[in-house]
Image (tube, rainbow, N blue to C red):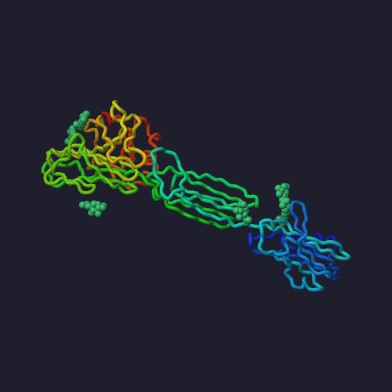
Amino acid sequence: MFFTSLCLLLLAGNGQMVQMDPSKSGFVGSQVELRCIFSNSNPPVKISQVTWQKLLNGTKQNVAIANPALGVSVLPPFKERVSFKQAAVRHRTPSLEDTTIVFSNLQLSDEAAYICEYTTFPAGNRENMVNLTVYARPMTRMTLTRPTIVAKPQKSKMTVATCVSANGKPPSVIKWDTRLKGEATHQETRNQNGTVTVWSNYMVTPSRETHRQKLTCIVTYRNEKITDSVVLNVQYEPEVKIEGFDGNWHLNRQNVQLTCRADANPPVTIYQWKLLNGSLPSNVEIKNNTLFFKGSVTYDLAGTYVCDATNGIGTRTGSVEVNITALTHSLPSVFSYPEFPNNPTPGGRGIPQDYVFGNGYSRAGGLPAHPPIPKNLQYPDDSDDEKKPAQIGGPGGFEASERDFDAEAEDLKRPYFTVDEGESRDYDERTLAFQYDPETEIADDMISQTDGSVISKKEWYV
Ligand SMILES: *[C@@H]1O[C@H](CO)[C@@H](O)[C@H](O)[C@H]1NC(C)=O
Ligand SMILES: *[C@@H]1O[C@H](CO)[C@@H](O)[C@H](O)[C@H]1NC(C)=O
Ligand SMILES: *[C@@H]1O[C@H](CO)[C@@H](O)[C@H](O)[C@H]1NC(C)=O
Ligand SMILES: *[C@@H]1O[C@H](CO)[C@@H](O)[C@H](O)[C@H]1NC(C)=O
Ligand SMILES: *[C@@H]1O[C@H](CO)[C@@H](O)[C@H](O)[C@H]1NC(C)=O
Ligand SMILES: *[C@@H]1O[C@H](CO)[C@@H](O)[C@H](O)[C@H]1NC(C)=O
């Protein structure tokens, strides 16, 4: 700009020029200097008057005038906020070489081009222009839609957090950073004063897996990054498993026990034990979530033990089938049991066709602590040796479940498997689908296990 003007002026054979910055910017409320320097020639020309003008939409408006004979004049509405920087300009016989003005308390409406025009004799008019841009810093904030979110069996996504960057100029850009598998929506509205409000909603399907996940909103405004994070608090029904049966409850073994373990938010308040088709043995003692069988193991202990765990969100069930053996060295019977569907289809096989084991959402919301155990619930015939661990994966090999069996030798002895917190990393994608979205990914003839693995129905029903 400078050199262009210089060249043009030199080519025109004149020694005078008006030096200005090509552009200037400032935030609303701040102060900015608009430079205007007249470089005179030798011999100097006479400056008759200097006029500052605002140029907007092709319309010129006078801002300030400096005249060597009459003094200076700042016009409304700029009177309060515009002044000449050099005290010399304001003298009775001013020097008008530097007519830089100071703009204070900038307003969005000040954004425009400003012309500084020198009227001289005998050289005529010389002028230059500066573009003034006014920025408005946005108000940025992130909010959780609700302090706690309840995981519902329906699979719809819901907005869990909103990030807003309001009345910014130029507009902000909002991004999200999280391990959650969600979606963001973006919207913006333009205000009349030229500022823009942008906001973004983050939506996820609330589930056990989304609990305690961190969600970060990253707002970029010009070169600045503003980040804000929240940790989700998702409430969900208990995820139940029964521990303690190792497949080797032989006669005369002493003091065996079963423990009902539940992952739940809020924590489980009620554990209910029962023995399917019977009453609990007389030597049993219940403490919290554990069944203690006092004394020696007898055949009376055999049966399917059921634990209902209830929290504020609902009740879910775990079960284990206990076999009593005479020998101490019998092979462990490894077998995964489904949880009991709370709403079995009447008649039929007792297991609804589309019911996916391990996904037993009993009901939405807090409900009675004793879900009915279906009378007609059938168990797969346990008599052959189909349920050895290596076969649970079934033909076609579900490597994940086989690997789990290998990895946890201890689990080989346990008849019942569920997802442990520590394992959940490996299940991230699968558990989401299995736990809360049973329709997807699982072929019709497959049954998901409570451990997140899948076995074929054929094996269940042989
Ligand atoms: C100043 O703004 C005008 C229009 O508002 C534009 O034509 C011109 O290119 C701008 N000049 C600079 C240096 O940005
Ligand atoms: C400038 O012109 C545009 C349309 O060309 C109009 O929308 C806007 O209001 C005008 N601004 C002012 C300050 O007159
Ligand atoms: C611009 O307009 C919006 C909406 O009317 C208002 O909230 C905001 O304060 C304004 N910004 C400035 C800098 O005047
Ligand atoms: C449990 O009782 C129901 C009827 O009350 C019966 O149909 C079912 O076969 C019984 N199950 C076992 C394992 O005895
Ligand atoms: C029962 O549970 C509570 C809370 O988890 C614990 O403080 C208490 O020690 C438990 N009692 C027994 C007998 O395990
Ligand atoms: C386990 O018990 C069932 C009946 O409850 C029986 O049919 C089966 O043979 C038993 N399995 C073993 C390994 O003892």
Q: State the residue at coordinates (84%, 67%).
A: 47
Compared across the picture, whether 223 is left or right of 444 comes to right
Which of the image's four quarters has the C terminus?
top left
Q: Which quadrant of the structure image shows residue 155?
A: top left
Q: State the residue at coordinates (76%, 67%).
A: 99
Which of the image's four quarters has the N terminus?
bottom right
Compared across the picture, whether 203 is left or right of 239 comes to right
Looking at the image, the residue that sits furthest to the top is 348
Ligand 3 picture quarter: bottom right
Looking at the image, the residue that sits furthest to the right is 122
Could you tell me residue 129's position as x and y percent? Answer: 75, 59
Could you tell me residue 78's position as x and y percent? Answer: 72, 62
Viewer can see residue 127: yes
Viewer can see residue 397: no
Could you tell me residue 274's position as x and y percent? Answer: 21, 39
Q: Nearer the viewer, residue 30 or 414?
A: 30
Q: Which quadrant of the structure image shows residue 446?
A: top left
